[in-house]
Image: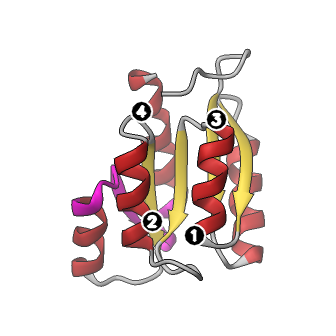
Amino acid sequence: MAAQGSEGRIRVLLADDDEVFLAALHELIACQPEFSVVGTATDALAAIELVEELAPDAAVLDLHMPLLDGVSTVAHLRRDHPDLCLIALTGDEAPALHHAAREAGADDALLKSDLVSLLLERLSATRVHA
């Protein structure tokens, strides 16, 4: 796993093709003292490239992004970065999609509507593994 930043912050990459949601998510994470947003992506391939380049501690990925589906993105990142904390996000309440994301290697799959409390709680657990 990537080393935490010099201030001990958990380094997070965010990826979502909804730029308004991405900006709001960025603001939410960045204002938390224990997290540092190290990059953002608006498609799955850019997210993969940024994980390679920036070596974040955690990645928060929308499951419905252009260029590669979310489950395949999660599987790729899990294979190449086994210690990366991977949180899948979706507005889709389909249990099969959430299960597929977890089976592919996501540490959790969260509904965007439940995001605030669950995401911050799950990302905070990254400190235990770092």
For mark 4, what is the residue?
A: 125
Q: Which secondary structure, mark 3?
A: strand
| Mark number displayed over residue 73 | 2
Mark nearer the N terminus (3 vs 2): 3
How far is the residue under mark 3 from the one under mark 2?
Answer: 19 Å
Residue range (magenta): 103-116
- Labels 1 and 2 touching (C-beta < 8 A): yes
Q: Nearer the viewer, mark 3 or mark 2?
A: 2
At label 1, counting other C-alpha atoms closer than 10 Å, the crowd grade (few under 14, some 14-19, many 20 or more) is many
- Labels 3 and 1 touching (C-beta < 8 A): no
Mark nearer the N terminus (4 vs 2): 2
Mark nearer the N terminus (1 vs 2): 1
Q: Is residue 125 above or below residue 108?
A: above
| Mark number displayed over residue 63 | none
- Mark 4: amino acid: Ala
For mark 1, what is the residue?
A: 44
Q: Which secondary structure, mark 2?
A: helix
- Labels 4 and 2 touching (C-beta < 8 A): no
How far is the residue under mark 4 from the one under mark 3?
Answer: 13 Å
- Mark 2: amino acid: Thr
Which residue: 75% across, 44% down?
30
Q: Is residue 70 magenta?
A: no
Mark nearer the N terminus (4 vs 1): 1
Which residue: 38% across, 70% down?
72
Q: Which residue is more in the foreground, 1 or 53?
A: 53
